[in-house]
Each structure stands twice: as structure tokens, then as C-alpha cells.
Image (tube, helix red, strand yellow):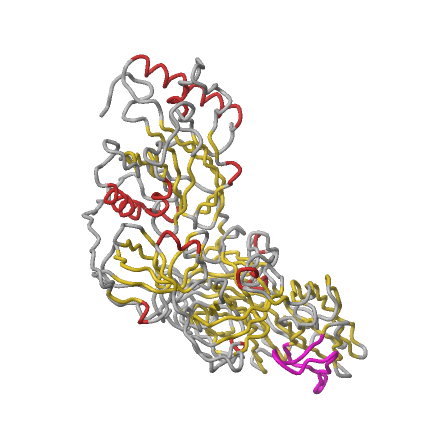
């Protein structure tokens, strides 16, 4: 085995060091920062800091990565330009123009001590300050929780900050939750008419709690309202549009919210919803066609307004919420969205075939009611099983139990390749149906993909690692026939988290799920993992040793790591082809590849591609060149003697292949028939395989093409000349068609150097 480690500079990160020497000069009655231009750097007066660990700490200026390619689940510790949580948990981050200022905390960056800071030049002539902003928890896979505190101070170099009361009173991000909470703070007279600089900051209250990944936290829609600068009546709204409403016919949509305030008013503020929409001062009730916000002494303090669609007319929706008060300019908020056809009653299997956004009603037995986190439940009927995810926990019955018969109404959606019902509008227990636990279906590990969403049992499984289980971690297990499966311990509340990994054979029950194309089994209850009647311990002495590469000083999460490996006759059971113990070879291959921690693994001599798929580490997928192998044209492979193929295994988290651009190349350079004079080209048909993919390293995307070679063997002059001619043809092809592309060429030369006649092994 040879390991080639390649570090690529994948994209340019634009860093802005936020030395806070500028300030915001207030005017009018409102200051708004929506961070949508953060790609060009922070606005005047804004800063990002670390080391703010107490109310007296001023902290250290921290750089901001302004590139818009950083994803919510990127684990690189730094301040970033993120897609705003306003787009929703399943929104397209890459195309989002609604941006937010955020931070990914790590043990080395901002935990504790991360802070967002804005500096006002002064508040001379202004009073009655009120603040609202969005606090966003963007990575639902981050287990740890962080509390935040809002503070202010005055003076050019303040010595201490004062905490502000907020609504909600406790500000928290993380905890395996995606959230987009509006935070309000009435500053009273604290900032009135101050001639020196005024600082407002949001900082971590303490170190994170829990284990696992730290959260990605962002702020958006920062609105500071005040009075005193204008003698004219004024209405303030926090945003001019509410986008992406989605509901079904005759069903109200989930609400979106914004903030309204007013100053110097002589009359109340009238808020009027457009046709087929309604507004309220609360999230769940009190909706009407119009609202009145009463003014007191000419002012209306910041009020959160909730607006939703009634769902009365199918089709695209556009309407305007108007805000009027005598003498004040009218303020408008535009609502846009879509009202889909009425919910259709469906089985689970048919619901999965419907497009995203289509409303459905499914019924079945509850198999998970919160064991994977309170927002995620599972329902199973006679046709299949499926997850239900809601950001509004109030929609779930408080008395339900696993085994209850339930009915769910909501929209179909997709999350990381998994079909599910999202944000249901109704979840109810079906009266008269006796509670009845679902009997798990017993399957083999290679059948996980056929049972997505179902409760199943894998019998006679042995874990390939020892120690204690960790939350939000995948583990490999093999049954007595050495067929592998991925077992996921889902979160910190899982009964197996921090418990010893069993050392005897187990029967494992759980829900089958898919994450980015990889199927896994997720146990729910303490009774889901029990000792099997048959004990067949996994036999493997695999203990690969890491090799230090002195030249490599770049952390692996900041580089594209590539490995090339010839696994001799992998999966070919014919005597004489490869090792005698094929089961042990697969177990060892799985163990070794789990230690690579590579983004791309070029593999050759892969005979059994299905066995390769079962041997891959957690989070990996693969593609193979199955059409072109040596002598494919005159000695076709058989089930008993499969041919050697070229494959690529890839980390699905960092590598996304372009399916239409993954193929054998040079297919037009030779004629592969029995009597053709060119049929010995590239080892008689073992053509180079081009694997094309978008790689996402440290939050930045770049397209690369990896050309995998399994060249002609042999050390005599004829073999040498064949290899030389083959490589010349390849170079001509690459120069002509891909002159400026990012190319990687990991080659398996069967121990023969291309440009020398000498055997090297």
C-alpha cells in the first residue's frame, strides 16, 4: 500500500481584522443592520471579539471570514459570513442572499469569550431606546449548549459592561437545535442623551455545556429604535418583506414575525393584513385581519407581529401588510409564498414519492416519540416508516407513547437525503386505537437500504471498536457472516451514550435512516441492544499504525487528503486470487480505511463492489468504473470470478461527485475487439477513470478531477513501451480537454515505474 497525501489550497478565504476604530452615527428614529452586505466586510461600528469572558473584559479583535461559502455545520472555529436562519432549517445556504454574522466556537476559539459588538458614536439628542435582533442557532447537529448575555457600556474605553434584561430572559444556542429567535430589550433611559461612545454587545455568558460539537451562533436583523431626532410621527418596521411562506389549501401557514414601533405619534398604529392573510401579537392565537397598537405619550414600544397565510386560495401568494397612523408615512411589509393543493391522505411509501412542499396526511404507529431529540419523531404504517420534524414542539401531544396510533398533517420535505414530514400543522392520537408496539422486522445488514424509516433488528452483530459509546457518533458492526452495518448513537440523551461498547455479540434494534446517502441503524431504547444467543466475536488483528509526514503541517480539516491503495483482488473468492480469507480481508480493509480520515481514496483491484460498500467507514460512499476492465471485450467477468475494477471512495461530507462527469476516459482512442490491433491499449481495456467532484474543505468549495490509473504490469521493454504510449495519450487528452482544471492523479503502477525499465518491488 502506498499513501499519497495531497494538500490543496481549496479556495481563498477573505479575512477582515475587525479593529474597532469606527462607530455608528445615529439619525432619524431607527438604526438597522441586516448584515446582507457582510461579504464586503462588517459595517462601520461593528466588531467581532474573543476573550470576552466577563463584564469587565474588553476582549481581542477577531478576524471575520467574509466569503459566503461557509456552511452552518462547518467545524472550523472562527467568525463567518453565514446564510441567515431566516431561510429556514432546510433552506439553500449556497444561494441565500439573506446573510447573518456568526461564529463557530471551538475549544480554541470563543468558548468561552466570543462576542458581537457595535459601537455608537453617541446618543446625543436621542432617548427611549429599544432593541430587537434575531439570535440564531444554525447547526442542529451541535450537541453542546451556550448561554449568551446582552450588555452595554459607555465611554471610549469602558471598564465594565452592564447586563440588559431581554425577552426571552435566557438566550441559548446549540443543544441539537435549529432556532431563529427574536430577542427584545427595552433599554429604558439607560442610553438617553449620552455624549460619549456607547457600546452594545452580545457575549457568551460562560463556557459551553455538554459534550460533542459546539454550536454555530449568528445574529441578524439588529434594530435599534429611539426617539428625539424627529418631530414628525414615525412608524418603524424591522423588515420590508416576509418570504417563503408555504402551506396547503384551507390550512393556515406557519407564521413569520417582524418588529413594529413608533414615535412622535398622534394616533394609534393600524396594522392591516392583505386578503387571505392575518396578523397577531402572539404566535399561536389571536389572529385577525387587522390589529391596533395603542400609542402612549406618542410612542409605541417594539412589538413582535406574527403574520400568516389563511390558505384560502391555491397558487402563488403576494400581499402587503400596511402600517398607518395619522401624520406618519405608511410602512409596508410584503408577504410572498405559495399555497399548495390540499393535503392528500397517503401511505408512508406513497408520501415519500411526493415532491417537497406537498401537503400530506399520514397515519401509523409511533416508533420514536423524542428519543432522538424532542423535535424528531417516527411513524410507521404497513407500507413503511418515516420521520416527522417540527420546530414547534407544541404541535406534539404531551401524553403520547411509543405504540400509539397517530395521524400527522404536514408538508413533505428532504433533509440530507432523507424524506420526511416537516413542521406539521396537526399531530393527533387516533381515538379508539389500542396502544400497540410495532414488532421490529429482522433483516440482514445489507438490507438496510430497503427498509428506510422502519423499525428493524440486526441479529448477531459485533462492534469493531471498543471503549465507550459517544453521542452523535457512528460505529461499525459486523454480523457473524462479516456483513457490516453502521450503528449510530444519536444524541447525548441516548441510553447508550457514554456506556461501554458491548464486547459480546448483540441483537440490535433501531430505526433505519439515511444521511447523505449512507444508511445507518439508530437504537432508541435501553432494550434495543441485547446479548445474542449466538456469540461469534469478530476476529481481526487490524491495528494500522499512523505514519508521520514531516512536511505536512496543515490540519486535515483544512486540506484535501487523498489516499491511493491497491487492495489485492478485493472480494474475489476464486482460489489463488488474493488472500485465502476474504472475510478477514474485508474486515481489515474496513479497519484500515477507518484510520485514513481521507477525503478521497483511489482504489484498484476491486472485484466485489458490493463488498466494498459494506467495508467503507462511516460517512463514506463510492463510485466504480464497472464497464472497462482488462479484457472486458473477450474475457467477461463472472459471479465466481469478478474482474478487477478501479473505484473511488469519498467522504460524503466533504466531497460531492458530479455524476455525469465520473466516467472512464480515452474510450475513443482504441477499438476493443478480439482481433483489433489496438485492443492492448491501457492494459487491454483498463482505462483511466475520471472522478469529478465539488470538494468542500474548511467551508470553501472547489471542483477537482481525480484521474485514477491502474497501469500495465510487467518490467520488459514491450511492457515499458506500452505504458509510455498509454501515458502520452492520456497527457494529450488532459492537455486538450482540461488544461486549466484542478487535476489529481493517484496512480497504481503495479510496482513498475512508468519511465524506467527497473522493477521496484
Task: Name the foreground residue: 323 vs 706.
Answer: 706
Count of numbered badges drawn on the protein:
0
Indicate whether 514 appears above or below 436.
Answer: above
Q: Quadrant of residue 296?
A: bottom right
Task: Name the foreground residue: 224 vs 4.
Answer: 4
Indicate whether 124 appears above or below 441.
Answer: below
Q: Residue furthest right?
A: 327
Which corner quadrant holds the C terminus?
Answer: top left
Specify the segment rendered in magenta.
Answer: 278-304
Q: Position of residue 135 (x, y in %)?
A: 52, 69
Q: Is residue 385 left or right of residue 595?
A: right
Q: Is residue 614 left or right of residue 275?
A: left
Q: Position of residue 648 (x, y in %)?
A: 40, 39
Which corner quadrant holds the N terminus?
Answer: top left
Indicate whether 568 appears above or below 199.
Answer: above
Q: Position of residue 540 (x, y in %)?
A: 20, 48
Q: Quadrant of residue 337?
A: bottom right
Q: Does residue 356 belong to the magenta stretch?
A: no
Q: Quadrant of residue 603?
A: top left
Task: Name the foreground residue: 694 vs 18.
Answer: 694
Task: Name the foreground residue: 747 vs 695.
Answer: 747
Indicate whether 257 appears above or below 480.
Answer: below
Residue plotted at (35% across, 69% down): 494
Q: Does residue 301 belong to the magenta stretch?
A: yes
Q: Position of residue 307 (x, y in %)?
A: 67, 73
Q: Is residue 536 left or right of residue 678?
A: left
Q: Residue furthest bottom?
A: 296
Amino acid at each position: 500500500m502506498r499513501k499519497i497525501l495531497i494538500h490543496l489550497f481549496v479556495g481563498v478565504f477573505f479575512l477582515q481584522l475587525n479593529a474597532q476604530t469606527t462607530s455608528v452615527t445615529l439619525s432619524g428614529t431607527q438604526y438597522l443592520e441586516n448584515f446582507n452586505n457582510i461579504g464586503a466586510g462588517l459595517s462601520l461600528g461593528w466588531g467581532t471579539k474573543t476573550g470576552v469572558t466577563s463584564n469587565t473584559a474588553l476582549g481581542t479583535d477577531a478576524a471575520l471570514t467574509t466569503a459566503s461559502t461557509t456552511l452552518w455545520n462547518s467545524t472550523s472555529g472562527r467568525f463567518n459570513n453565514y446564510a441567515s436562519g431566516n431561510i429556514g432549517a432546510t433552506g439553500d445556504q449556497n444561494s441565500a442572499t439573506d446573510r447573518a454574522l456568526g461564529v463557530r466556537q471551538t475549544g480554541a476559539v470563543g468558548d468561552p469569550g466570543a462576542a458581537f459588538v457595535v459601537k455608537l458614536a453617541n446618543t446625543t439628542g436621542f432617548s427611549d431606546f429599544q432593541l430587537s435582533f434575531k439570535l440564531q442557532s444554525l447547526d442542529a447537529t451541535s450537541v453542546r449548549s451556550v448561554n449568551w448575555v446582552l450588555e452595554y457600556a459607555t465611554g471610549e474605553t469602558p471598564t465594565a459592561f452592564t447586563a440588559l434584561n431581554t425577552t426571552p430572559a435566557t438566550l441559548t444556542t446549540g443543544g441539537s437545535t435549529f432556532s431563529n429567535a427574536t430577542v427584545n430589550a427595552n433599554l429604558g433611559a439607560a442610553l438617553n442623551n449620552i455624549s460619549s461612545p456607547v457600546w452594545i454587545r452580545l457575549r457568551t455568558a460562560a463556557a459551553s455545556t455538554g459534550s460533542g460539537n459546539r454550536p454555530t451562533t449568528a445574529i441578524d436583523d439588529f434594530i435599534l429604535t429611539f426617539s428625539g431626532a424627529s418631530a414628525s410621527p414615525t412608524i418603524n418596521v424591522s423588515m420590508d418583506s416576509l418570504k417563503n411562506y408555504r402551506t396547503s389549501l384551507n390550512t393556515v401557514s406557519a407564521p413569520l414575525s417582524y418588529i413594529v414601533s413608533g414615535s412622535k405619534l398622534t394616533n394609534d398604529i393600524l396594522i392591516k393584513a392583505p386578503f387571505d392573510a392575518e396578523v397577531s401579537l402572539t404566535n399561536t392565537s389571536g389572529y385577525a385581519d387587522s390589529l391596533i397598537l395603542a400609542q402612549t405619550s406618542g410612542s409605541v414600544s417594539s412589538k413582535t407581529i406574527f403574520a400568516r397565510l389563511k390558505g384560502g386560495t391555491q397558487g402563488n401568494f403576494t400581499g402587503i401588510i400596511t402600517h398607518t397612523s395619522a401624520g406618519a408615512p405608511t410602512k409596508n411589509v410584503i408577504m410572498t409564498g405559495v399555497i399548495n393543493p390540499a393535503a392528500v391522505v397517503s401511505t408512508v411509501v406513497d408520501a415519500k414519492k411526493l415532491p417537497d412542499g406537498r401537503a400530506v396526511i399520514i397515519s401509523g404507529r409511533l416508533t420514536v416519540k423524542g428519543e432522538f431529540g424532542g423535535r424528531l419523531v417516527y411513524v410507521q404504517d404497513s407500507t413503511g416508516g418515516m420521520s416527522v420534524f417540527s420546530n414547534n414542539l407544541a404541535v406534539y401531544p404531551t401524553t403520547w407513547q411509543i405504540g400509539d396510533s397517530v395521524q400527522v398533517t404536514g408538508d413533505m420535505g428532504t433533509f440530507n437525503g432523507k424524506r420526511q414530514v416537516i413542521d406539521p400543522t396537526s399531530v393527533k392520537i387516533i381515538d379508539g386505537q389500542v396502544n400497540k408496539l410495532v414488532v421490529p422486522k429482522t433483516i440482514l445488514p445489507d438490507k438496510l437500504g430497503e427498509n428506510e424509516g422502519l423499525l428493524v433488528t440486526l441479529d448477531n452483530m459485533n462492534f469493531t471498536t471498543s471503549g465507550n459509546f459517544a453521542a452523535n457518533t457512528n460505529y461499525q458492526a459486523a454480523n457473524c457472516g462479516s456483513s457490516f452495518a453502521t450503528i449510530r448513537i444519536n444524541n447525548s440523551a441516548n441510553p447508550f451514550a457514554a456506556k461501554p461498547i458491548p464486547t459480546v455479540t448483540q441483537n440490535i434494534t433501531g430505526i433505519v435512516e439515511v444521511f447523505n446517502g449512507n444508511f445507518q441503524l439508530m437504537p432508541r431504547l435501553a432494550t434495543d441492544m441485547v446479548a445474542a444467543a449466538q456469540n461469534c466475536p469478530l476476529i481481526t488483528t487490524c491495528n494500522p499504525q499512523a505514519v508521520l509526514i514531516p512536511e505536512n503541517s496543515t490540519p486535515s480539516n483544512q486540506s484535501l487528503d487523498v489516499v491511493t491503495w491497491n487492495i489485492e483482488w478485493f472480494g474475489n473468492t476464486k482460489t489463488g486470487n488474493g488472500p485465502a480469507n476474504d472475510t478477514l480481508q474485508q474486515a481489515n480493509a474496513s479497519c484500515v480505511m477507518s484510520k485514513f480520515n481521507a477525503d478521497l481514496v483511489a482504489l484498484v483491484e476491486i472485484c466485489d463492489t458490493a463488498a466494498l460498500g459494506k467495508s467503507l467507514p462511516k460517512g463514506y460512499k463510492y463510485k466504480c468504473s464497472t464497464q472497462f476492465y482488462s479484457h472486458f471485450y473477450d474475457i467477461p467477468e463472472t459471479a465466481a470470478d469478478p474482474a478487477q475494477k478501479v473505484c473511488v471512495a469519498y467522504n460524503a461530507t466533504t466531497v460531492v461527485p458530479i455524476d455525469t462527469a465520473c466516467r472512464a476516459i480515452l474510450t475513443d482512442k482504441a477499438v476493443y475487439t478480439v482481433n483489433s490491433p489496438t485492443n492492448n491499449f491501457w492494459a487491454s481495456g483498463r482505462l483511466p477513470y475520471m472522478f469529478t467532484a465539488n470538494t468542500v474543505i474548511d467551508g470553501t468549495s472547489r471542483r477537482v478531477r481525480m484521474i485514477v490509473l491502474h497501469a500495465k504490469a510487467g518490467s520488459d521493454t514491450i511492457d515499458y513501451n506500452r505504458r509510455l504510449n498509454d501515458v502520452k495519450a492520456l497527457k494529450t487528452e488532459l492537455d486538450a480537454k482540461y488544461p486549466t482544471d484542478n487535476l489529481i492523479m493517484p496512480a497504481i503502477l503495479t510496482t513498475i515505474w512508468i519511465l524506467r525499465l527497473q522493477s521496484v518491488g
